[in-house]
């Protein structure tokens, strides 16, 4: 049944579905960031410092460690950003769901009013028909 809220309900439902997709993307992004951070930490653990050798080997190892730490910092920043993005997306989804439920409730109330009005009108029509048939029946005519 079409009401004045039907189009708003459709818009709010589309908005809610869009927010659900955003939460899924943010969750996937967080998962990717977590995996990247774990992989970079594992790579850092695998770097073995040289026990002996020339100074350039030690410097090269030091540079490798520094670059791996920079990668870890980047991945930590990505993880924090992805976590914040997920929380924001979840909050937006919550707001969109509340808005959708509000308008859905208003639409249901409107439908209920329309149904009640139709029932009252039907009862009125039936009463009118009953009165018309009662007056036409000769055995029920009033004696004056």
Image: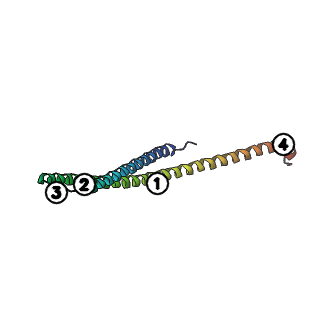
CA gap, disc 3 to disc 1?
A: 65 Å
- 6, above or below 94, in the image: above
CA gap, disc 1 to disc 2?
A: 51 Å
Mark found first going from the N terminus, 4 or 1: 1
Res. 76 visible in picture: no
Which residue lies under the disc numbered 1?
98
Please provide percent x and percent y for residue 72. 26, 54
CA gap, disc 4 to disc 1?
A: 58 Å
Which residue lies under the disc numbered 2?
47
Q: In the picture provided, is 66 more to the left or to the right than 88? A: left
Using the image as rendered, state which of residue 118 and residue 1 is in the foreground.
1
Discs 1/2, front: 2
Q: Is disc 3 placed on a helix, strand or loop?
A: loop
Which residue lies under the disc numbered 3?
52
Q: Is disc 4 placed on a helix, strand or loop?
A: loop
Discs 4/2, front: 2
Instruction: Farthest residue to the left: give it.
Output: 55
Q: Is disc 1 placed on a helix, strand or loop?
A: helix
- Label 4 packing within 10 angstroms: few (<14), some (14-19), many (20+): few
Discs 4/1, front: 1
Discs 4/3, front: 3
Instruction: Farthest residue to the bottom: give it.
Output: 51
């Amino acid at each position: 049944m079409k009401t004045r809220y039907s189009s708003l309900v459709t818009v709010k439902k589309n908005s809610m579905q869009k927010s659900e997709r955003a939460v899924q993307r943010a969750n996937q992004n967080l998962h990717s960031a977590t995996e990247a951070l774990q992989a970079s930490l594992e790579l850092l653990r695998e770097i073995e410092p040289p026990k002996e050798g020339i100074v350039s080997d030690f410097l090269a190892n030091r540079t490798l460690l520094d670059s791996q730490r920079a990668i870890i910092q980047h991945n930590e920043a990505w993880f924090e950003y992805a976590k914040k993005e997920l929380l924001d997306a979840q909050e937006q989804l919550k707001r969109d769901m509340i808005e959708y439920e509000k308008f859905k409730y208003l639409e249901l109330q409107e439908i209920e009013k329309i149904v009640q009005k139709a029932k009252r009108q039907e009862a009125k029509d039936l009463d009118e028909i009953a009165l018309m048939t009662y007056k036409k029946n000769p055995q029920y005519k009033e004696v004056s």
